[in-house]
């Protein structure tokens, strides 16, 4: 009974700490001052759990990880009744991805041959091998939604998600705000109103300016492309030597 009471008491303490954390930071801080916890509800919950502990009653507890390592706002659907437009845009995005129709255009109509050539030039300067054969013979002619974004093999190999994870949002030493890769799937606040503006900003971000970051090796100054590492086959067995080193 004493052990059970200690567990229940710990649960009460955990709940109280969660309430304080929510109100002082985390989700509460992100959503702004409009989020106000109901004190009466919190008090009743705390009182109820303390009563259970005093009576020696059992309580079954479960938990799950609701965090996300990626920052893509279109990857997670939340409830946001204060802004009906959020529901509309998320529904439209889902409909487009499920049924792109005539908008399922070839990749090269979005990421153009000119953009690839500029990327290839950058890769040559830093000593990376050419991947033009993959571009010319495969990727440029794929339909961008059904054959690229929804390609399960690319997903299982993490060939798109891993580079995004590493460079999406980078915490920099000496400043409060992180540095974001120019993309619509993070909090980047620059002008991305045209494809050319996006590509110019992306290329500069990836290859020009070093960022001061903290890592397991200590404080480092790295250009974002230097943060990209080979994907570990032990963790992602779908990866092959060709896709790993080419």
Image: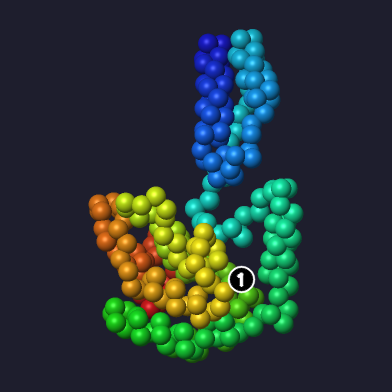
Figure quadrant of residue 203? bottom left
- Residue 132 at x, y = what percent? 42, 87
Residue for point 55% across, 25% down: 16
Front residue of 192/237: it is: 192
Figure quadrant of residue 202? bottom left
Residue for point 64% across, 83% down: 105
Residue 162 visible? The answer is no
Q: Is residue 45 above or below residue 130?
A: above
How crowded pointer 1 is (Cα within 10 Å; few <14, some 14-19, many 20+) is rated as some
Q: How many marks?
A: 1
Figure quadrant of residue 129? bottom left
Q: Is residue 205 above or below residue 37?
A: below
Front residue of 81/112: it is: 81
Q: Quadrant of the C terminus?
A: bottom left
Residue for point 71% across, 52% down: 83
Residue 209 visible? The answer is yes
Q: How is the image coloured?
A: rainbow
Q: Which residue is mark 1?
A: 150
Residue for point 28% across, 80% down: 127
Name the secondary structure under disc 1.
loop
- Residue 113 at x, y = what percent? 49, 89
- Residue 15 at x, y = what percent? 57, 26
Q: Quadrant of the N terminus?
A: top right
- Residue 148 at x, y = what percent? 58, 76
Residue 102 located left or right of residue 5 = right
């Amino acid at each position: 009974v004493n052990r059970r009471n200690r567990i229940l008491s710990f649960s009460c303490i955990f709940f109280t700490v969660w309430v304080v954390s929510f109100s002082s930071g985390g989700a509460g801080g992100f959503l702004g001052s409009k989020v106000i916890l109901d004190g009466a509800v919190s008090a009743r919950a705390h009182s109820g759990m303390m009563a259970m502990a005093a009576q020696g009653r059992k309580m079954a507890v479960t938990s799950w990880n609701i965090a996300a390592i990626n920052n893509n706002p279109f990857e997670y659907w939340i409830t946001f009744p204060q802004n009906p437009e959020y529901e509309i845009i998320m529904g439209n995005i889902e409909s487009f991805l499920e049924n792109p129709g005539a908008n399922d255009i070839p990749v090269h109509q979005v990421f153009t041959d000119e953009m690839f050539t500029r990327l290839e030039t950058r890769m040559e300067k830093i000593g990376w091998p050419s991947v033009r054969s993959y571009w010319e013979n495969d990727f440029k002619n794929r339909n961008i939604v059904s054959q690229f974004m929804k390609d399960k093999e690319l997903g299982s190999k993490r060939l798109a998600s891993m580079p995004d994870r590493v460079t999406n949002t980078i915490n920099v030493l000496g400043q409060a705000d992180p540095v974001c890769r120019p993309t619509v799937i993070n909090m980047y606040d620059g002008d991305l109103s045209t494809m050319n503006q996006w590509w110019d900003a992306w290329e500069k971000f990836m290859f020009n300016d070093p960022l001061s970051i903290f890592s397991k090796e200590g404080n480092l100054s790295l250009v974002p492309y230097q943060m990209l590492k080979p994907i570990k086959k032990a963790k992602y067995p779908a990866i092959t030597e060709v896709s790993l080193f080419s």
